[in-house]
Amino acid sequence: MDEYKETVLNVYFKDRKDNGRFSSQDICDNLRDTVSLTPDEVTKYMMGRGYVLERQDDRLVWVKM
């Protein structure tokens, strides 16, 4: 992943309290005005930072473990 994309994601997730709310696509959509990300890029980023996927209401969302 490009360094600038990682920087944007780091800022986006700094001190977030909405655990279990967003899917990879949601995160891409939330940041699309700032940076172009793919769900694969977000998934790799999240897995590398201790997040796991959890099924909620027939959706897979990210939860910090």
Image (cartoon, helix red, strand yellow):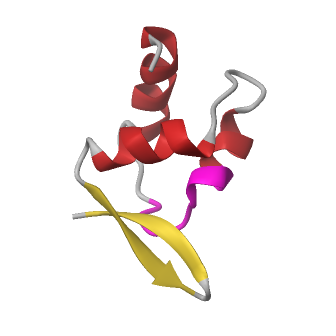
Say if 50 sits above or below 20 in the image: above
Left or right of 39 in this view: 29: right
Main SS of the magenta segment?
loop
Task: Count all numbered tags in the image, as a single digit.
Answer: 0
- Measuring from the top left, give residue 18's x and y in whole percent: 47, 61
In the rendered image, which quarter contains the C terminus?
A: bottom left
Say if the magenta span includes residue 20. yes
14 left or right, relative to 9: left
Q: Position of residue 40 (x, y in %)?
A: 53, 43
Residue 34 found in image quarter: top right
* Residue at (53, 72) in percent of width and height: 60
Quick check: is 38 in the magenta stretch?
A: no
Q: Residue furthest front?
A: 40
Q: From which residue to which does the magenta span run?
A: 18-26
In this view, which residue lies farthest toward the right? Answer: 33
Q: Residue at x 42, y 40 (%)?
A: 13
Q: Quadrant of residue 11?
A: top left
Q: Position of residue 52 (x, y in %)?
A: 32, 63
62 w.r.t. 14: above or below? below
Q: Quadrant of the N terminus?
A: top left
**Which quadrant of the figure has residue 54?**
bottom left
The residue closer to the viewer here, 44 or 17, is: 44
Compared across the picture, whether 56 is left or right of 15 comes to: right
Q: Residue at x 50, y 68 (%)?
A: 61
User: Residue visible at 66% across and 54% down?
Assistant: 26
